[in-house]
Image (cartoon, rainbow, N blue to C red):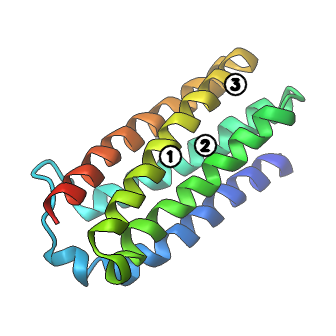
Amino acid sequence: MAALVGFLALSYAVCMLASVPIILNSNGWFATSAQAPWMPEGWMFRSVWIALYGCNGAAAWLVWRKGVLAGRARRTYGLQLLLNLAWPFTFFALYPLLGTAALWIAFAVICTLATVLMLLILEFGPVHTGAGLLVLPYFSWVVFSASLNLYSAIHN
């Protein structure tokens, strides 16, 4: 059980760090920017991300319990955490410095994240079906978020 707590703690630590540039900029430039008509309310993002980070930690724990969170699976898991952490910094924090270029860089980051998540599903799924399934909503939300990012990059 301690390992599950550890994986959840790691996921939520990334969540908290990723929240910093969002909190610092959501009422600044982002509030006045052009946003996609399908943009959900802010509370929905917080709720969904909290659930997704929990699923992500639980998925890694399920694979770890099988003794397979090593090698490529561990690298893929770590890379998706880093990319998930990098995206809000590129999208929210770099915009005041780079303008629209930051939004395009963030789009490249989130597309890379989506690709890595596909690989993670392919790594986790054969080891533990539940782990692969736990990553699917995360992948879907990232693809949805990429559409929002693309809209911002085109219209700002």
Residue type highlighted by circle 1:
Leu
Q: Quadrant of residue 149?
A: bottom left
- Mark 2 Cα-neighbour bin, 10 Å: few <14, some 14–19, many ≥20: many
- From the image, tell me which residue sits under label 2: 56
Q: From the image, state whether disc 1 or disc 3 is nearer to you.
A: 3
Question: Between 37 and 149, which is closer to the camera in this rendering?
Answer: 149
Residue positioned most to the right:
67
**Which mark is on residue 123?**
3
In the displayed structure image, the side of residue 124 where residue 39 appears, left or right: left
Q: How would you rate the neighbour count of disc 1 (Cα within 10 Å): few for under 14, some for 14-19, many for 20 or more?
A: many
Q: Mark 1 or 3 closer to N-term? A: 1
Left or right of 116 in this view: 68: right
Proximity of marks 2 and 1: CB atoms separated by less than 8 Å = yes
Cα–Cα span, label 1 and label 3: 18 Å
- Name the quadrant of the N terminus: top right
Residue to which mark 1 is pinned: 52
Within 10 Å of the Cα at label 3, are there few (<14), some (14-19), or many (20+) other Cα atoms? many
**Amino acid type for the residue under numbered disc 3:** Glu
Give the quarter of the image for residue 124: top right
Residue 145 position, x and y percent, is: 33, 48
In the displayed structure, would residue 1 be above or below residue 9?
above
Which residue corresponds to the image point at 74% horizontal and 51% vertical from the top-left?
7
Q: Quadrant of residue 111?
A: top left
Q: Reading the chain from its start, which is encountered first: label 3 or label 2?
A: 2
Tell me which residue sits at (52%, 35%) in the image. Answer: 115
The x and y percentages for residue 37 are 9, 51
* Drawn side of residue 33 relative to residue 57, left or right: left
Q: Position of residue 78 (x, y in %)?
A: 71, 49
Give the percent coordinates (x, y) of residue 151: 19, 52
